[in-house]
Structures are given as C-alpha cells and as structure tokens.
Image (spheres, grey):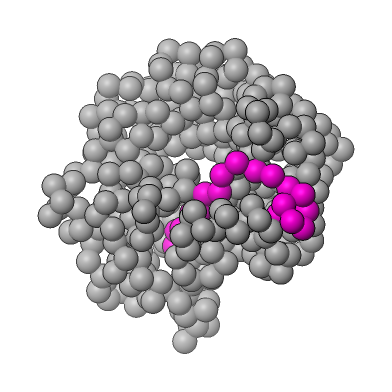
Amino acid sequence: MTKSLLAQHHNLADKTTQLKILSNGIFGEGKLPTFRKKLEPLGEFPLKPNSIEIFQVNVGYMCNQVCNHCHVDAGPDRREIMTRETIDQCLEVLRKTNIHTLDLTGGAPEMNPDFRYFVEEANKAGVQDIIVRSNLTIILANPKYHDLPEFFKKNNVHVVSSLPFYQPDKTDRQRGQGVFKKSIKALQMLNAAGYGQEGSGLKLDLVYNPSGAFLPGDQAALERDFKKELKKNYDIDFNSLFAITNIPISRFLEFLIRTENYEDYMDKLVTSFNPSAVKGVMCRNTISIDYDGHMFDCDFNQMLGLKVEKQAGQHIKDFDIEKLLQRSIVINQHCYGCTAGAGSSCQGTVVVS
C-alpha cells in the first residue's frame, strides 16, 4: 500500500499536491471535519489577527543539513535566497511600524550572503528582539561561520536553536549522522560567548520536535530534562525550551505516508483539538515573509503557497498594517497541528497548564 500511495502522490514537494492530500485525505475520502467546523462553534470563524508583533522572514531555503522533519524542504541544493532589495523592503517596514520582533528563519538563515547586513540594519532600526533560528551546525560548517557566536553577541541576537533530543541517537536519526556532536560543540561555543548564562542578557533557547508521529510531551517537563542532562553531560546552559508539533506538510508528510501513519496522525491532531489554543496561535500576531517578499499568515502557510488575503496586499512592497489587521486568516487542515494538545507555535506551546 505504501509504495502505491507514494507513487500516486509522487511529487510531495508540490504545494498543490500537499493541499489536495490535506483537504481530501490520501485516499480522497475527506473523512475528517474541516478546521472551519471546529472554529465556528467557538465564534472564531473567520479567524482574525489580534495584532502584528512578530515579523517572521524566511531569508532562503538553502541549508547545510537535510532534516527528516523539515517543513521547508531545505537543503544544500536549494537556491531560493532573499535579495538585498527585498531585505531593504523588509527593513523599511520595520522602520515605519512598531513591530517589536524580527524572526529570521531559513533553511540556515546565516547562509544568506546579506544575513549580517539584515541583522545589523534591524538593530539600527531599533528592533527590540532579533531572533535567529539557527541549526547550530552551521557555526562549524565553514570557517567563515566560526565567529557567529561573537557576531550574535555583538548584535544582541536572540538565538533559537533546534535540538531534537539531549541524546545522540534521536538527534542524529532526525537530523543526520554526527549532527548531535556538532550541535553540542556549537552550544558550548555559544555558552562561552555568554549565551544562556545568568545575568548576560544573551538569550539561548532550544526547540524540541518529536522524532515520530506523535505530539510533543509537556514542555515544562521536557525543559527540566533537557537542562538537567545537558548540564550534567556537557556543561551546557540555556534559557528556555520550546516544544513544537510537527506539521503534516513537506518531508514530514512524506514520512507519514511512507510509514502508513498519515491517517492516524491526522486523527490524533483532530481529536486532540484544544479550543483554548485557538486564542494563542501564532498567525494571530505574526506575518510571515518568504524569500521573494510575499506575505503569509504563518510559516506553514508559506510552505503551502497560501498567501494572505488578496485585499490585504500580498507582497512586502504593498505592506499596509491596517489592511493586514482587518484580514481573515487563511486556514486548512494543517492548522490542527497548532491547536492540538497544548497548542504549538514558533514560541512553543500556547496553553500553559
């Protein structure tokens, strides 16, 4: 069955194919209730933004890693990179608004040739919180990246790094052979620069993604375990841990179909729907920008090609905060991933027990 399904959906990198599977199921039966039907009884349809506090910019899909769960489908062979012109358009928005957080993602955002320019100019523009989502191993990938911890420190960058687990086997299984060892070395370099150290003001947060077709455990308990094990075994300190649910798109969608877990996983997301999580989903305070300057309600919609409503303006050059605040957020079945259990966002769980 698996081979025939993969043959039927042979191009899972294609956004239209992914949307078709999400909307209709892998057999085209469409059994699951739509996300809209979950929102309507709560008075939350159409889903509306509360504010725009976070400006999340994907500066390119190029990456030095090829991770099994990557919803961006990033890797060394990707050539999509944000240009200086588009970066300047993003900076102009930051200068003209009160958006307090710039969240830089990739791929490996550090591989964009204008990455450092973007960070430095955002600092000059007075952005309060500049987040860089680093895969850690990029710091060791090439001598030109070895000074990144000091660059981050100089620019007071808030580093958010993915570490699937505090043991080598699970991390390497998800991210590639030898990634855990390199990640530990990079974390130690960040600690040496002051990151994660009490009183330094330099924030180092980690991201945990489940390694299989299940929801993340309790975020607070995971954070305690990570802090204990990383300190005991590697003398590593960090500030917070974010537990993020794997969204059924791109490589993770392919994994679900290949392992015949798609239907069970989607059913798990639907049955774990938490009405309380709806108020805290990231699309309500975030705008996501792709490498080409197009605007999306979230990073996951970006990967599915679901731009913000047309009347709100769909490109950064047409950015109008008032129109964007009036838009209705575009939803689909993958949105169940952000409202399952304790909820999930780029800042971790959204419902604190």
Instruction: Give the residue drawn at x 32%, y 65%.
Output: 272
Taking 86 as reference, is 15 left or right? Answer: left
Q: Position of residue 152 (x, y in %)?
A: 70, 29
Above or below, 79 relative to 194:
below
Q: Position of 346 compared to 203: left or right?
A: left
x%, y% of residue 228? 66, 56
**Residue 318 falls in image quadrant:** top left
Q: Quick check: 282 left or right of 116?
A: left
Query: Is 234 inside the magenta-drawn segment?
Result: yes
Picture coordinates of residue 28, whole percent (x, y): 31, 74
Up-down relation of residue 309 to residue 124 (above or below): below
55 or 19, which is in the foreground? Answer: 55
Q: Which residues are magenta?
A: 230-249
Q: In which image quadrant can residue 168 be found?
A: bottom right
Q: Is residue 14 visible?
A: no
Check the image and name the residue furthest to the right: 143
Could you tell me if residue 39 is visible in this image? yes
Q: Residue at x 33, y 22 (%)?
A: 321
Residue found 43% across the figure and 47% down from its top? 345
